[in-house]
Amino acid sequence: MPVHIDVLTLFPRMLDGFLAESILGKGLERGLLSVKVHDLRTWCTDKHRTADDRPFGGGAGMIMKPEPVFAAIEQLQKPGCRRIYLTPDGAPFSTKMAEELSKETHLVMLSGHYEGIDQRIRDTLIDQEISIGDYVLTNGTIAAAVVIDALSRFIPGVLGEEKSLTHESFTNKLLDFPQYTRPAEFRGMSIPSVLLSGNHAEIEKWRHAKSVEKTRSVRPDLLK
Ligand code: ADE
């Protein structure tokens, strides 16, 4: 069954272009996955559609209120679904997580805003907290987009060539080797001659060496 993703956000339009474009847009069109974006304000019942309030104990910033989030998730969740909260203090996102999430049948993604959300939401409604990196975005909507994009690549059929997954950065814990396309000479720069040799064993050896070299210089932590 293709994975269905419900995204809960205060900025639903941020995802319009993202979902319509590119490989992901085609995957959605072909029904290989489905994504529905929900405006959290739909579940804000007061006159001003308030989604946030001041923190107990004082301090700067506003906190997302529990009522609308509880109402929304309780309406959207189904048995067996995985409820994810996007937050800079979550577990670091990885290709392994993307692959695991691509095998789920139903994801509910909550993107956080303001200075945080009421802890009772996290304690009772959330199965997994994910951060896409050590920096703080203005809200989690783009983080949800990043997770959806990365997991979609593991859904069979989304990428044209299944092969393109096996060779890439992170799948093998090594960064990518350099790639070239025509013309073989451009503005005086020629491509490495091994790539024109037709010797596949030599090409593989060269690519592996380049991957190791690149990984050692940019991400030595991956080699440990
Ligand atoms: N919301 C704000 N910053 C974030 C981050 N780095 N990862 C996930 N969600 C976020």
Image (cartoon, helix red, strand yellow):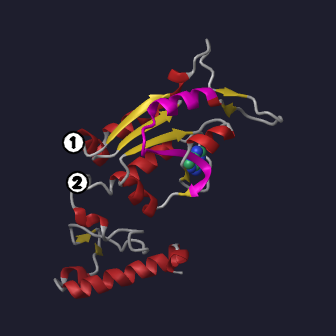
Residue under pointer 1: 30
Residue sitting at x 31%, y 71%:
167
Dot 2, how many residues are within 10 Å of its Cα: few (below 14), some (14-19), or many (20+)? Answer: few
Place residue 185 in its image quadrant.
bottom left
Provide the secondary structure element on which disc 1 rests: loop
Q: Is mark 2 within 8 Å of ligand 1?
A: no
Per the image, is 73 magenta?
yes
Q: CA distance from mark 2 to mark 1?
A: 9 Å
x then y, percent, for residue 7: 45, 37
Figure quadrant of the C terminus? bottom right
Left of 126 or right of it: where is 210? left
Please indicate, yes or no, whether residue 120 appears anywhere in the rendered image.
yes
Q: Residue at x 45, y 29 (%)?
A: 38
Q: Is residue 172 magenta?
A: no
Which secondary structure, mark 2? loop
Range shown magenta: 67-91
**Is the residue marked by circle 1 packed among few (<14), some (14-19), or many (20+) residues within 10 Å?**
few
Q: State the residue in front, 99 or 132.
A: 99
Q: Is residue 11 visible?
A: no
Looking at the image, residue 207 sits to the left or right of residue 53; the answer is: left
The amino acid at mark 1 is Arg
Left/right placement of residue 118 relative to residue 210 reads right
- The image quadrant that residue 169 belongs to is bottom left
Seen as rendered, the residue at the extreme right is: 57
**Tag 2–tag 1 contact (CB < 8 Å):** yes
Q: Which mark is residue 157?
A: 2
Q: Looking at the picture, how far across and down is residue 69, in whole percent? A: 57, 31
Asked if 75 appears above or below 116 in the picture, the reply is above
Residue 67 screen position, x and y as percent? 62, 27
Amino acid type for the residue under numbered disc 2: Gly
Residue 151 drawn above or below residue 141: below
